[in-house]
Image (cartoon, rainbow, N blue to C red):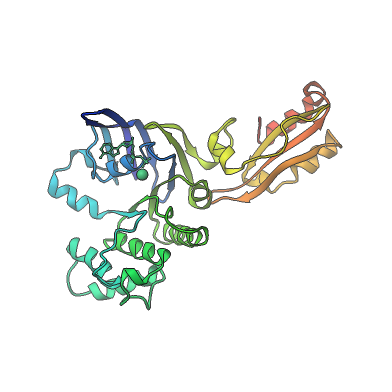
Amino acid sequence: MIEIRGLRKTYRSRKGSVAAVDGVDLRVGEGEVFGVLGQSGAGKSTLLRCVNMLERPDAGTVSVGGLEMTRLRRGQLRLARHGIGMIHQHFALLSSRTVAGNVAFALEVTGAPRAGRKQRVAELLEMVGLTGRAEAYPAQLSGGQKQRVGIARALAARPKVLLSDEATSALDPETTESILRLLHDLNQRLGLTILLITHEMTVVKRICTSAAVMRDGRFVESGTITELLRTPGSELARGLFPLDGPTEVAGATVVDVTVSGPEAEAPIIAELARRFASDVRILGGSVERLAATRAGRWRIALPGAPDDNREALKFLSERGVVS
Ligand SMILES: Nc1ncnc2c1ncn2[C@@H]1O[C@H](COP(=O)(O)OP(=O)(O)O)[C@@H](O)[C@H]1O
Ligand SMILES: [Mg+2]
């Protein structure tokens, strides 16, 4: 649905130049929720803004739904943008318009016929759980409600793709949860493809099917959540399941075991204990429901040196990732 190849964008000023996006390749399939995780200044917003051409890339191609955005002329680009909704950290609502007015504005801009607009606004407000707040003004809304208006507005023209720039970063954890649930629900109900950027691991955990870590304008790792969990040393895997148990235990071999999918439900540690190391100790870890899969990660101590545990380690490697 979204395909980016060799994307570069450099900002130049008198003080010098900043390669905000420095060679990014990205594919987001239809109905996928792809998260780009990175710290402030990593180039995330620039990357996102290159998808709908709010920023013109210096090099590379961007296509959305098969349309090569980089090649479109102004008129065509305006039309193409109707197929791409966008939501923002600070909502960007019109303060002088009501909730319904803000959503109706998006319909006016995209040239939806006047007849039927009212009906469509009601439909959109229902979709985001704001029925009953239609006549309120932004200043009267909570942060979560404001973001719901932002989402309704972004979906006005029935886009196939939604871009989200830190949509939950200004919200408290509970409200974040409810907005992520709404996005997940819209992804499932409408088959909406979502490309989101965030600096919060929880966001990736809750709704992403794929993710990338961005640093200094580049992706340092990227893949489906399942793939990443199976990649030894993956930063995202570590972030999704922080392990705080000790890394060394006298007289024992300490390893981290990561499993996903059906293996997360299986009694792996029990089987390990039964077959190989009856005194295996769990030092830390958990099993969690991620958006894409169920996964487990444990730090365990096997009595003895690695050589004494060769069979046990082989057994674990066959079930998941051992590091
Ligand atoms: N319009 C701009 N002009 C000059 N530099 C910019 C502009 N927008 C972003 N940058 C710089 O590009 C880099 C990446 O910024 P940004 O894409 O906003 O990162 P992020 O969203 O990950 O915080 C930063 O160093 C930022 O200062
Ligand atoms: Mg940003």
Determine which quarter of the picture holds residue 85.
Answer: bottom left
Which image quadrant is residue 263 in? top right
Q: Nearer the viewer, residue 270 or 66?
A: 270
Residue beneath the point at 40% across and 45% down: 29
Query: What is the quadrant of the N terminus in the image?
Result: top left
Q: Position of residue 227 (x, y in %)?
A: 54, 37
Q: Residue furthest front?
A: 15
Question: Ligand 2 appears in which quadrant?
Answer: top left
Question: Hey, which residue is sitting farthest top in the picture?
Answer: 307
* Left/right of residue 284 with respect to residue 43 in the rendered view: right
Quadrant of the rendered image containing residue 27? top left
Position of residue 256 measured from the top left corner of the image (x, y, whole percent):
68, 34
The residue shown at (33%, 61%) is 150
Please tell me whether residue 120 is drawn above or below residue 207 in the rendered image. below
On the rendered image, what quadrant is the C terminus found in? top right
Residue at 17 percent across and 72 percent down: it is: 114
Q: Is residue 256 left or right of residue 120?
A: right
Where does residue 157 sit, x and y in percent of width and height? 26, 61
The picture places residue 231, in percent across and down from the top left corner, at 57, 32
Residue under the image location 39 percent in, 54 percent down = 167
